[in-house]
Structure formats: structure tokens, C-alpha cells
Amino acid sequence: MTNATLSLHEKDQSKMPLEYTTEEGDLRIFGFWIFLAAELVLFGTLFGTYLVLQSHTAGGPTAKDLFEIGPVMAETIILLMSSFTCGLSTIELRRHNKKGLIGWMSVTILLGLVFIGLEANEFYTYAVHEGAPLSRSAFLSGFFVLLGTHGAHVSLGIVWIIGILLQLGKRGITPVTARKAFMAGLYWHFLDVVWIFIFTAVYLTGLVI
Amino acid sequence: MIDSIKSFMGWFFVTGDPMIYGADASIALASIGIVAVLTYFKKWKWLWEEWLTSVDHKKIGIMYIIAALLMLFRGGVDALMMRTQLTLPNMHFLDAEHYNQVFTTHGTIMIIFVAMPFIFGLMNIAVPLQIGARDVAYPFLNALSFWLFFVGAMLFNLSFVIGGSPDAGWSSYAPYAGAEMNPGVGQNYYLLGVQISGIGSLATGINFLVTILKMRAPGMTLFKMPMFTWSILITSVIVVFAFPAFTVALALMTIDRLFGAHFFTIAAGGSPMLWANLFWFWGHPEVYIVLLPVFGIFSEVIATFAHKTLFGYAVMVWSMVAISLLSFITWLHHFFTMGNTAPVNAFFSISTMLIAIPTGVKIFNWLFTLNKGRIQFTTPMLWALAFIPNFTIGGVTGVMLAMAPADYQYHNSYFLVAHFHSTLIAGTVFGIFCGLHYWWPKMFGYLLDETKGKWSFWIFMISFNICFMPMYFLGLMGMTRRMYTYPAGLGWTPINVVMTIGAFGMGAGFILMAYNIIWSAMHGKKDATGDPWNGRTLEWATASPAAEYNFARIPHVSERDPFIAAKEGRKSGNAASVQRYAPIHMPNNTGIPVIMALLMFVAGFGCVFEWYWMAIPGAIGVIACMIARSFVYNDHYYISVEEIKRTESATGRLS
Ligand code: HEM
Ligand SMILES: [Cu+2]
């Protein structure tokens, strides 16, 4: 489908990335940015809540008691790597290289899966072995819900990207699939940025203070 | 076995109160009636194809308004029950527990399920037409937003007959709303019902923000947009930045109640004040979400019926921008008395009072628009004119409440209740009634009867003053909010009697309006031209109701009030006549939004009762719907030139 009849504001399309060439693609990507702004407020609220409750440990384990730098570093490095491979996939998208795009996106979600595995393991250790489930104290409620929301976003992102990979496989790189791949990339980078804040505001401050 | 079923039923259904049995019976009868009528007239297919699966913004708008009117009826009945109970001292019409439930459902329904959806309905109808667009940016998402609101409202209302209503007030303060002090499912209904419809609201905010920023007709720069569109643009920004905070607050309290977390409990380090902050961080912007759009409506209506351009257009815009920014830094005025330091109270006191400046500017601009205008007293204009003084009283008492030391006197008294009803009724409700009468012909192709409309206006407006003007004095005399009865001998009785009379008068005004709607559906004057009011903006350039594609050719705009310009023979507002008709790209109808929302309802209901065998499949179903949608590629079709010509000539618009 071309956008010949749809487009009101004619643009020189030859110079644009594929995902922006249709009016619809342009609209959706713009809306996605706004969605990410709303997500920013959502995570901002969770961060605020966590920071308020951080010291409310009610005699239970504190951040210092629980956190270990090893697994946290592993999670961080893996997620950052996935952001890098996600960036590579966008480069392949620009080159209209379907194989490269699918390949790097697959690597990205594999890294995402490893991240989720590590995080699940961390949660399990805290909740079961260290006697620190979310119901133990306000601090732990804040911790589990902030990180859990991030983890749920990553998991949903993985499901979403699998769907996009199937569509790419079937239809190749079209303005529509290009748009979807591009938006998934934005989403993935966004989650990475959130993780950087989690790393700083939750783990680093938790280990230091 | 029989006994266990019996005891389950006794717990599951709310029992023991004749009013509830009455509600059960009427819900059952209404449902049977609807099913019977639809089946008898063989309308199921029509309902599904024309409405439930529609992605047309005009139909979605109508569905929003119908649902909001029904909810207004329910919220109004709640209000009358409270007023009946309070008419005389020591009455036993409602007991304490029941009264708590009724003010909670009244407040929640009025704000979340009446004011917001009514406004969303009007903006769905008018905004795309005003900016010369063929639809909103994301028609699918628009339908989904509506259905999420709808199932959220249904879930909330179900609490009345199944499981029990919430009773912690519309602001649901912790710790009272927590699991320990408030066991049972009532509060869960509040959390889940409001959450589900809130997700829809957030999506609507994003949708209209993009629509207005990206889909305006060529030539319509931001500062040539109609004022209503401006108000919706600014409101959408508030929605996008305020709602996520509420989503989080509701989710945290849900996790507290369902999974034993400690965000807002007293025990284990939770912070009840955190709830108050999160709630009002959304809650104060929310009052502007339901107010700025009606400012927009009044601007349109006052300019139209004063037959003048709006006075101080740019100032009107900038004052709305200022209000929207200030609305995010005033939330603490809702709890001046709850242990803040003096500097904090001072800051929020001043930021609150500052809002009076841009609001006052707007009031004067409306007055100057009226000045030397040829004023035509139509029903919409009467609502708009009545808004100005009545709302100003609400604004002035708001400034009184904003003075923190004085608020120690007013706080949670009937003075406050009178204040927010002055703004919510004289602002929001007058505004949505004004918009309803104004855009009714655009929605349905005929006008509401003017005589009946004016009668309902006068009855409602006078009764509003009879009910709420004395209420300020009652507050100053010491009657506090949310009390279910009061002793004799405090001097409160006469005022309470008068207020109840006023409340029933408002009910009568509303019934007359409902009668007018039914009467006009049968005998209303047809709107053959599409422009019954000599309108100024582009929605009046279309037929009434507008064709499915809105504009056969996209108009070009070169000045404000483009339709007036076109009528006066200037170029703006006319589609370039050289342009030929071309096939029009339209989105397909789809059943996914309704189905997805119903699954959301299942998931929500499961969470309310903590039945995870129900909630989890529901949630999985929702995700499955999203995946299914992602794989739909064939989601649009074209309207052929022949069909456009046929439609246009049917309304005499072929050119
Ligand atoms: C017929 C018109 C109305 C009448 C007679 C009425 C009356 C009342 C009464 C008696 C209360 C409870 C006061 C108390 O016990 O504390 C109340 C509370 C409230 N009303 Fe209305 N009301 C009306 C319309 C509205 C409308 C249109 C809105 C909003 C758009 C609204 C929003 C609220 C809210 C938010 C509360 C506070 C609920 C709470 O305390 O949690 N009301 N109203
Ligand atoms: Cu406020």
C-alpha cells in the first residue's frame, strides 16, 4: 500500500527512512514518543515512591543487607549489550538488510531473556532465601514493584519483538514492518535508560548508603 | 452442598436492603428488556456492525455521551439519596455504612464516569471536524479507549449488587482504604474499575494530542485553531502527564490489598501520606481535565451567539497554558491541615491563588466578547451565560480555601462541598449541557427543542443555587462533610431542608432535559443545512450528521473562524475548488476493542474477588488480543469517488 492518497502534506520521500515515509508511520512514531513520555511519568512516580520508602525497612533487611554487586553488574552489562545490539538492528533496518535486522533483533531478545532470568533469580533469592518478600517492609514493596514493573516491561517487549520478527520474516521490510521494528527499538532503549536509573538510584545508593 | 451454595450467594450478592433488591430487579428487567427489543427488531447485527465495532469518532462520541448520561442518572440518584437522608435531623433513610458507600460512588461516578467521558464524547464529535480531519490519529485505539471506559464503569457499578460498594470516599485515603480496615471487595472494585477506565483515558490523551498536533487541515496553524480544539490540546497534555501517576497510585494500593505489600499501611513502614500525595498529584490536574474543555466549549458558544470573534484569542490560549502548568504544583492544598510545615503550606497556598489570575483573565475575555455583541439567547448560550457568575462564585470561594490558615476552618466542611460543586456543576456540568445542546444537531441531524431546553435550563440553574448557595453558610455554621446525620438544635435544619428541595429541583431539570431528548428525537426540527447556529468553525461546514469521511475534500484554512470567512466569501474554509474528488482511505471496523475490553473486565472482576483462576486467563486474553491486532494488516478500505458523489449530492453538497 502506498500513501499516495493518504498523504496531505507531500514530502520528499526518497530521503526519509522507510518508517517515516507514510503518513501513518509518521503519526504512530510521534505518538509512541508521547507514550514514552507518559511511561517516564509512570516510572518517575515509582522512583519517587521507592526513594521515599527506601529507609522504611521496619526492622527487616536493608538494601545493604540484600544487594550484591556481582549479579547486578551482570544484569546491567547484559541489558546494555542488548541495547547495543538493538542499535545495530536499527542500522541494518536503515540498510534494508532483512537478515541482519532479524539477526540482531533476535540477539537482543535473547539477551533480554537472560536479563529476565537473572532478575527472576535475584527476586527468588531475596524473597525465599533471605526472608525478604514484598510483604516484609515498605522498602521491599517499593523495590519489588519498581523493578518488577521494569521487568514486566522487558518481558512484554520480548513478546512484542517476537511478533515483529514473525511479521518481518513473512513480509520483509516494508514501511509498516520497518515502523514496528523502529518503535520496538525505541522502547527497548527507553527501558535501558530506566535501568540506568535503577542501577544508580536503587543499587548504587543502596550499596553505599 | 445446597447450604454452601446458599452461603456463597448470600456473600456474593448484596442482600438485606429493599433498595438493593429494587436495583437487582430493575437491572434484570432493563437487561431483559434490551435483549428482547434487540431480538424482536432483529437489531443484533446492526448493533454489532454499526456501533460496537465502529471506529468512527462520531459514533464513539455518541456512545460516550449515552454512557455518561446513564452514569449521570446513577450519580444523581446517589445525590438525591444523600440529600433525602440529610433533610431532617436523625433520619434513618440510610444508615452510616450505606451513606458512606453512597457518597463514595456518587463522587467517583460523577468525576470518572460522567465528567470525563462526557467531555471525551464531545471532543470526539467536534475536534476532528473542527480541524478538518477525517478521523483521529488512531481510530482503533479510540474505540479501545471507549470500551475500556465502558467496562471500567460497569465493573464499578456492579459493586452495588455483587459483593458490596466501596466506602472510603472518592479520594480513598489510606489507611482507611487499606485491607486491614476495609476488608471485602468494595474497595477493590474502586481500584480496578477506575484503573481500567483510566488506561483508556491515558490513551485518549495521547490520541488527541497527536491528532491535533499532526492532522490539522492545511493552513490551520496552531494559532488559527478553534478555542475548543486548543482546550483539548492542553487537556490532553495534562492527561498524559497526570494519569500515569494515578495508574501507579491505584496499582500500589491494589498490590497492598491483594498481595500484602506495605506502601500505604501504618504497619511495616508504609506511608499513608504517600497515598494522599500521589492521589492529589493526579487529582488536582484532573479537575482541570474536566474544566479546561468546558472553557473551550463556552468560548465557542459565546463567540457564536454574540456574533463576534472571541475577544483576546492569544490571551485565552496562554491563560489555559498557564493554568495547565500551575495545576501540577497545587496538589497539596487538599491537605493543608495534615501536618505540613508552614513554608510548604505557604508555597502551595500561593501557587493555588495564582491560578485565579489566568482564570480571571478568561472570565473578563468572555465578558468582553459579549460586550456590544448581538446576543442571541439560545439554550446553549443560556448555559454559557449562567456559567460566568455561578462559576465565579466557585472560583472566589476557591481562593478563600487556598488561604492555608483559613482552611483550618473550612477544611472538610460543607463550605468545601459547596465550593467544588460550584465549580463542577456550574463549570463542568453547565459546560457539558451547553455542548450537548450546541453539537446535538451535528450528532443527530435535528435540534433539541428550544422551549423545553430553556425550561430545563432555568429549573436546573435556579435549583442549583437553591441547593448550593445555602450550603456555604451551612459549612460556616460547622456542618462537616461526609456525616450521615446530625442532631437537632444546631440551627442546621432549615438550610438542609432548603438544600434538599434544590437538589430535587435539579433532578426535575434533568428529567425535563431527558424528556426533551426523547421528544426531539420524534419531533425535533431537522437541521437541513448542517449549520443551524450560523457557526464559525469547520464542523458546521459539514452536513448534519457529517458523512462518514467528514470532508469530501480537505478544506484549506487561512484565518481563524474559517467557516465564517467562507460564508462571507473569503477563501478560507473552502476546499480548493480545482481539487477533484479522490478515493478516501478509511479504517475498517473491528471487533477487537470490545472483545479486549470484555476480557479486561473478566481480569478485573477476577482481581476484585482475588479469583486468579479468572484473572489470569482474562489478562492472557488481553495480551492475545494485542498480538492478534499486531498481525492485522488489512485494516483499511477506500471509499470510491462514485460513493462520495452520491453521499455529497444527497446533502446538496456536490460541487
Ligand atoms: C444534583 C446535583 C448534585 C447534588 C445534589 C450533589 C450532592 C452531593 C452531596 C450531598 C455530597 C456528599 C456530601 C458529604 O456528605 O460529604 C456530594 C459529594 C460529592 N459530589 Fe456531589 N452532588 C451533585 C452533583 C455532583 C456533580 C455533577 C459532581 C461532579 C462532576 C459531584 C461531585 C462530588 C464529589 C467529588 C463529592 C465528594 C465525594 C466524597 O466525599 O468522596 N457532585 N455531592
Ligand atoms: Cu486541587
Image (cartoon, coloured by chain):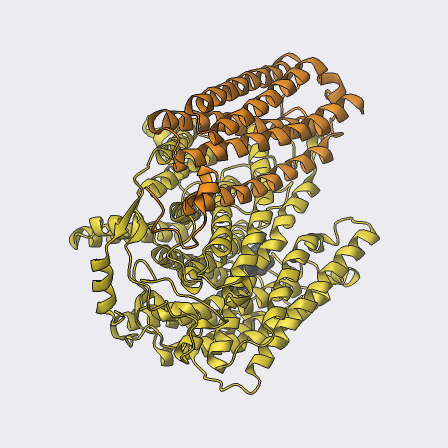
Q: Residue at x 48, y 46 (%)?
A: B203
Q: Judge from the rendering whether residue B388 lies leftward or rightward of residue A184; answer left or right.
A: right
Q: Position of residue B216 (x, y in %)?
A: 46, 59
Q: Colour of chain A?
A: orange
| Chain identity for the colour yellow used in the image | B
Q: Judge from the rendering whether residue A44 lies leftward or rightward of residue A185; answer left or right.
A: right
B48 is higher (above) or lower (below) than B524: above
Q: Position of residue B371 (x, y in %)?
A: 58, 85
Q: Which quadrant holds the C terminus of chain A?
A: top right
Q: Nearer the viewer, residue B3 or A146?
A: A146
Q: Nearer the viewer, residue B257 or A185?
A: A185
Q: Position of residue B467 (x, y in %)?
A: 55, 71
Q: Quadrant of residue B71?
A: bottom left
Q: How many marks?
A: 0
B317 is higher (above) or lower (below) than B1: below
Does any portion of residue B490 appear in the rendered image? no
Q: Which quadrant holds the N terminus of chain A?
A: top left
Q: Residue at x 60, y 81 (%)?
A: B368
Q: Judge from the rendering whether residue B209 lies leftward or rightward of residue B647; answer left or right.
A: right
Does any portion of residue B443 appear in the rendered image? yes
Ligand 1 lies in quarter: bottom right
Q: Nearer the viewer, residue B504 or B157?
A: B157
Q: Nearer the viewer, residue B164 or B445?
A: B445
Q: Residue at x 57, y 18 (%)?
A: A115
Q: Position of residue A51 (x, y in %)?
A: 72, 34
